Image (cartoon, rainbow, N blue to C red):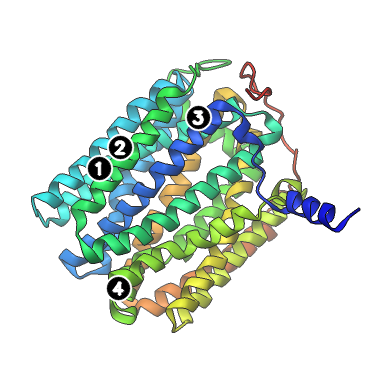
Amino acid sequence: MSEVGSRSSLLRRVAVDVRPLRHDAFRRLWIGQSVSVVGFQLTGVAVAVEMFDITASSLWVGLIGLAALVPLVVFGLYGGAVSDAVDRRKLLIASSYLTWASTGGLLLQALLDVESPGVLLALVAVQSVGFAFTSPTRGAVVPRIVPRDLVPSANTLVSTALGVGAVAGPLVAGVVLARSGYALAYGIDAALFTAGLYAAHRLPPIPPLGEVTRPGLRSVVAGLAFISRHPVVLMSFAVDIAAMVLALPRALFPEVAEERFGGPGAAGWLFASIAIGSVAGGLLSGWIGRVRRQGLALVGAVVVWGLAVAAAGLAGDLWLVVLLLAVGGAADLVSAVYRQTILQNYAPDEMRGRMQGVFIVVVAGGPRLGDLRAGAGAAAFGVTASWVGGGIACVVIVLALAAAVPALRGYRAGDGPDPDNLVEGAAEPR
C-alpha cells in the first residue's frame, strides 16, 4: 500500500464517522442542535456570571443547579413517558417553544435591569422544564432515523456538536460579557435557537410504535423497573452520577476566574475547557465504534475524568487548568457515547422515551447537583478542597462500582436485547 493510501486508511479509522449525516432527518436535527447549543451554553455562562455579579456568592451560583434540577427530575421522567405515547416530532416542537420563551424572559429581565436572584432562578426553572421534554424526545428520535449500526456514530456526532457548542458558547460569552452585557448574550441565544426550531419542524412524523402506554405514574414506574432489571443500564447511570455530582467543578469557575485569573474572560476559558477536550476527542473518535469491551472502556474513561479534574484543581496557571480539564472533557465524551449507546441498544422503541427521560435526568441533573455540591463545598471547606476532593472521590466510587458489578466491566458491544429499528427507510440514506 502506498504512503498516501496508508495515511488515508489511518484517517478513516481515527476520524469521526460522518455516515449518519447522509440521512436527511438526522442531518437537519444535528445541524439545528449544533447551532442552538451555542446559544444555550452562552446563556448558561451568562446566568452564572450574572448571579455571582448580583450576590458575590458561589453558593448562589450553585443554587442555579438546584433550581434547574427539581423541574428536570419531575418533567424529565414524565417527558420521557409522554414521548413514548405521542408523535415525537410534535412534542419536540412544543417543548422547544417553551425553552425559547424562557430565553426571552432572561433577555427581558436583563433589559429591565431587574438584578433579582429569585427571578433568575425562576427563569432557569422554566428553561429546565422545556429542556426536560426536548432532550429525551430528541434522544429517542435518533434510533428511529438512522440504522442501528450507525447509532454509536450518530451519538458521537451529537456529543461532538454539543462539545463544539460548549466551547464556542462560553468563549463568546467571555467576550460579550466583558464588552457589552447580559442582554446581548441572551439575545444571541434567542436568535440561534431558531435553528433548532426549524430542524424540529422539518422532522418527519414519528408516531409511537409497539404498545402505547398512557403517560403517567404507572408508565414512569414501568420505565424505572426496566432499568432495575438490567444491571448494566443501572450502573451506566450510577457512574455518570458519580462523575458529575462528585467531580464537576463548574460552579467554582466564576469565583476562581475572579480571584485567580482576572475576571469574565478567564471564566469563558474555564467554562469552555471541558468542551474543548470533548470536541478534540470527538474529531478523533473513529475508534470508538470498534471497541468491543465497552463496559471496561466506560469505567476507564470516567476514572480519567476524575483524575484530570483533581489535577486541574491543583494547577496554578490558567493554561494548565484548561489543558487538564480538556483531557477530562475528552474522557467524558467517550463515557457519554458508550452510556447513550448502551441505553439505546437495550431499550425497545416503546420504552426509549422513558429511558431517555431517565438518561436526561441523570446527565443533566447530575451536573446541577454537582454545581450545588461544589458551591456548598467551597463555602464550607474552600475552593481547592471542593474541587480536588470531588475528583478523587469520583475515582474511588467508580472503581468500587466496577468491582462490585462484574456485568458493567464485562459488557461488550452488541450485548443485550436487539430492538428493531422500525423507521421506514432509515437504513437507506437519501
Which image quarter: residue 10?
bottom right
Of the numbered discs in the image, which one, if any, rests on residue 247?
A: none
Q: Secondary structure at mark 3?
A: helix
Proximity of marks 4 and 1: CB atoms separated by less than 8 Å: no
Which image quarter: residue 154?
top right
- Mark 3, Cα crowd under 10 Å, few <14 / some 14-19 / many 20+, is many
Q: Secondary structure at mark 2?
A: helix
Q: Amino acid at mark 3?
A: Gly
Q: Position of residue 50 (x, y in %)?
A: 21, 61
Q: Which residue is mark 3?
A: 353
Between the C-alphas of marks 4 and 3, the distance is 38 Å
Q: Amino acid at mark 4?
A: Glu
Sequence order check, earlier mark of 2 and 4: 2
Between the C-alphas of marks 2 and 1, the distance is 7 Å
Of the numbered discs in the image, which one, if any, rests on residue 255?
A: 4
Of the numbered discs in the image, which one, if any, rests on residue 103?
A: 1
- Asked whether residue 215 appears in the rendered view, the answer is no
- Mark 1, Cα crowd under 10 Å, few <14 / some 14-19 / many 20+, is many
Q: Secondary structure at mark 4?
A: helix
Q: From the image, which quarter does the C terminus lie in?
A: top right
Q: Position of residue 148 (x, y in %)?
A: 68, 31
Residue at 61 percent of width and 58 percent of height = 281
Sequence order check, earlier mark of 3 and 2: 2
Sequence order check, earlier mark of 4 and 1: 1
Between the C-alphas of marks 3 and 1, the distance is 25 Å
Question: For the residues carrying marks 3 and 1, which lies nearer the camera in this image?
Answer: 1
Q: Position of residue 111 (x, y in %)?
A: 12, 50
